[in-house]
Image (cartoon, grey):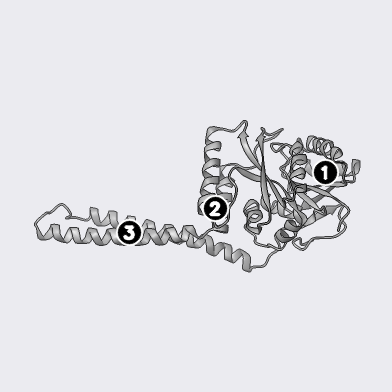
Amino acid sequence: MSEIFCSIVAPCWNEEETLPELYRRIAEVMEQLGECWELVLINDGSTDNTSQMMQQLHESDPRVHYVEFARNFGHQIAVTAGMDFAQGQVVILIDADLQDPPELILQMIDKWREGYHVVYAIRSERKGESWFKLFTAQLFYRLIYRITDVNIPLDTGDFRLMDRQVVDQMKGMKEHHRFIRGLTSWVGFKQTGVEYVREERFAGETKYPLRKMVRLAITAITGFSIFPLQLATFVGFATAIVSAIFIIFVIIARLSGYQAFEGQATTLVMVLFLGSIQLISLGIIGEYLGRIYDEVRGRPLYVVNKAVGFEAQPVHSDI
């Protein structure tokens, strides 16, 4: 077992403004702990001075290790790489924007010492976010909770502590479309949550606009539920039943001399309605087929350009 007790993993994409403060606060917290620790920074194809900042932090403190991707692979893949490279008995995932307070780490470790394998952070309040962002976030978490096959806690992000036993299980999951908080729930073990207030970004702009949020929601749903496929089947049966009833109604109306259904307008409306349902169903099937295609190609999850401060290379990388 590695001598490192705790690994803090922080994926970064254009976070040059936040990295010095992130390091300062993490170092301050970890010094209180009095254990050997490392900060694992993942440069997810940043275009600013994030890489140079990581190098400076490593030179000033060898406990700061960093990985540079060959290009941008996305937040969830960057988190995966951090877990692959982390060497500690305990691994903590945290975003580099400081919306998740590093000071909560001590409380998480206390819960781990009580015997919990996963300690996730529950957002009791979200500062500085619009009503639309808050509404869609709440809708997302509750929708996922209702339709997925695993019990994913409400109002939680990727900010969490994981025992080495959990991390080792996660490293064996090589699926390309990843939803980390769902995977940590799927593996099981003893889990609990701690509440906190999510702050505004320390600097810079959000890295999760609406487009990426929608994509993450689709990944979460298709990765842990076949409900969309079942829904397409239910809608198909419902449409068939309604159509059958409508046909009987039209026949009776025609036999009784009622002329309201003459002409092409009704036919066109029905054809367009049925065609739209068919296209939506094909789109749902295509989403699942696309994920199967991504998996069978067998490409690595990410490509590493440079890794500094690590003794060995993990199985997911391709250097």
Name the outermost residue toward the top: 128
Closest to the camera, between mark 1 and mark 3, is: 3
Q: Which mark is residue 239?
A: 3
| Dot 3 amino acid type | Thr
Q: Secondary structure at mark 1?
A: helix
Percent from the top left, x then y, of residue 104?
A: 74, 38
Q: Which mark is residue 218?
A: 2
The answer to which of 172 and 163 lies nearer the viewer is 163
Q: Does label 1 or label 3 sit earlier along the sequence?
A: 1
The answer to whether mark 3 and mark 2 are in CB contact below 8 A is no
Residue behind mark 1 = 54
| Dot 2 amino acid type | Ile
User: How packed is label 3: few (under 14 Cα within 10 Å), some, or many (20 or more)?
Assistant: some
Percent from the top left, x then y, of residue 304?
A: 78, 56
The answer to whether mark 1 and mark 3 are in CB contact below 8 A is no
Rendered residue at 55%/46% (across/down):
141
Quadrant housing residue 277: bottom left
The answer to which of 78 and 50 lies nearer the viewer is 78
User: The C terminus is located in which quarter?
Assistant: bottom right
Q: Secondary structure at mark 2?
A: helix
The answer to which of 157 and 208 lies nearer the viewer is 157
Is 218 rendered above or below residue 251?
A: above
Rendered residue at 62%/65% (across/down):
295
Q: Secondary structure at mark 3?
A: helix
User: How packed is label 1: few (under 14 Cα within 10 Å), some, or many (20 or more)?
Assistant: many
Q: Is residue 74 visible?
A: no
Q: Is residue 91 left or right of residue 149?
A: right
Q: Is residue 9 left or right of residue 201?
A: right
Percent from the top left, x then y, of residue 21?
A: 79, 34
User: The N terminus is located in which quarter?
Assistant: bottom right
